[in-house]
Image (cartoon, grey):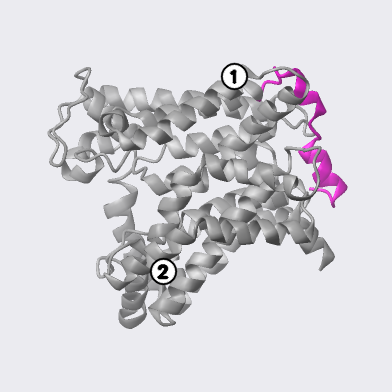
Amino acid sequence: MSSIVALLTGHLSTRYYFVGLSTFFLLFAGTFYSSFYRLSRDRGDFNQLIEDGRLATETRQLGKTLPLEYPPTARPLFMLLAAPPPTWSLVFWWFINAWFYWQSAVWLSREIVTDGQGWKTLLPAFALIGLTSVGIVSDLSVGQLTGLILFCVVGSFELDRRGYSLAGGALLAISLLVKPLPAVLLLYYLLRRRWRFLCATIATFILIGPLLLTVLFGWNAQVEGWRWFAETTARQRSPLHVFHRWGDMPGMCLTFRESGLASSLIRLCMEVTYDKHRHNVQLLTLQPGILRILWFLLVGLPLAWAACSVTRRKLETHHRFHAFAAMTGIMMLSNPKFISYWLAVPLVTIAPLAVCVWRTRRKGGADWICFTALLIWLFSNISLGFPMLRAAGSIPFGLYAITLANLIRSQGDNEDDAETPSSDAEGIKHGGK
């Protein structure tokens, strides 16, 4: 029990861990009211989640009979949320997601060592929360799944480097059940040769994914569910396919809600007639095939750089923290449907930059690469209030800045990196790989 408490609280005492958690609840209490308002008006994503779960429970079908375009493996979660009365379900979902965000911030902020005691030890976590507050507010207000994804991504990394590879792999598998996007991060663990982690991920996914679906729905219903998901979501929303099919999905480009790299490139390089905003940000005219190549270069080259950073150094080097953060940023850049609540996930990408800025400041210096990247990220968040900037790709630009800063720091150019303890060595200390 003590080891679990130590794992959760990290560098904080138990008292200040709960003080910080209570403060987080109070700071974001407005989203609690907002989510209930949406529930009473049958609005918001949470209403759609429980409606999807209710239909799955009643019909025992997977596929076009369900309203949401999620993988079939997400249905057991939706069914659990739909089981209790909606009000009680929403209370549980809001508090558990708020805890997900707080716990993720605690884990990521433990690298920022402060000289203070007491409440000052809470400052690093709240600083990271402040840098992603736009996404957190959006997610908690609508009741989406972003908090769960972030918790699984951060928790799997934390557990692995502390030596709990099996638990970390199982946690990452949970995120893959509801969103295929974190599959990008499997490359990190594959290049690290974390075979136990990967085996745990695969085994957990199969056990509470296809096997559980077979028990609940039967084999034929599951096959139909995967076929429908592949046709309506996996293929049509893939970033390499969206350039040719954007006309069939006007919500991807005709409004500014979706601010992913793919949709931003379409706005910049193709003629788009907006249905809600009469702004046009087109700079060039490029064919869909050229845009596909351009997207592949913008995402593929940083991914190759991050992969080289992982493989070219010894296991005990801490620079892989930057490489993992960069891969998380690349994961977000590859998402063609990037909505405001996804702005919380770059908490992973921001954390190591904040570490570098803090440690160079303590020595009287300045890490201008990381500091500038964080400023660009803040600007991209502020730009959400300006439709023209958002349409032109301010969000992907901010993501690209913090991703590239992590890639540069993954090469070990910062003289203060030598002070950072080895995450892998720490994992071995806590029980091996």
Question: x, y percentage for residue 406?
Answer: 60, 27
The answer to whether 245 is drawn above or below residue 6 in the figure is: above
- The residue identified by callout 1 is 369
The answer to whether 92 is drawn above or below residue 311 in the figure is: below
Q: Residues within 10 Å of mark 1 (few under 14, many from 20)?
A: some
- The residue identified by callout 2 is 75
Mark sitting earlier along the chain (1/2): 2
The magenta region covers 410-433
Q: Is residue 406 magenta?
A: no
Residue at x 44%, y 45% (from the top left corner): 134
Q: Nearer the viewer, residue 140 or 266?
A: 140
Say whether residue 75 is visible: yes
Question: x, y percentage for residue 176?
Answer: 50, 55
Tag 1, which secondary structure? helix
Q: Is residue 200 left or right of residue 342?
A: right
The N terminus sits in image quarter: bottom right
Residue 273 falls in which quadrant of the image?
Answer: top left
Q: Nearer the viewer, residue 206 or 18?
A: 18
Task: Tell me the amino acid under the disc marked 2.
Answer: Arg
Residue 241 falls in which quadrant of the image?
Answer: top left
Tag 2, which secondary structure? helix
Could you tell me how far apart the alpha carbons at marks 1 and 2 are, in whole angstroms? 43 Å
Question: x, y percentage for residue 383?
Answer: 36, 32
Residue at x 48%, y 50% (from the top left corner): 136
Q: Is residue 374 left or right of residue 342?
A: right
Q: Is residue 348 left or right of residue 194?
A: left
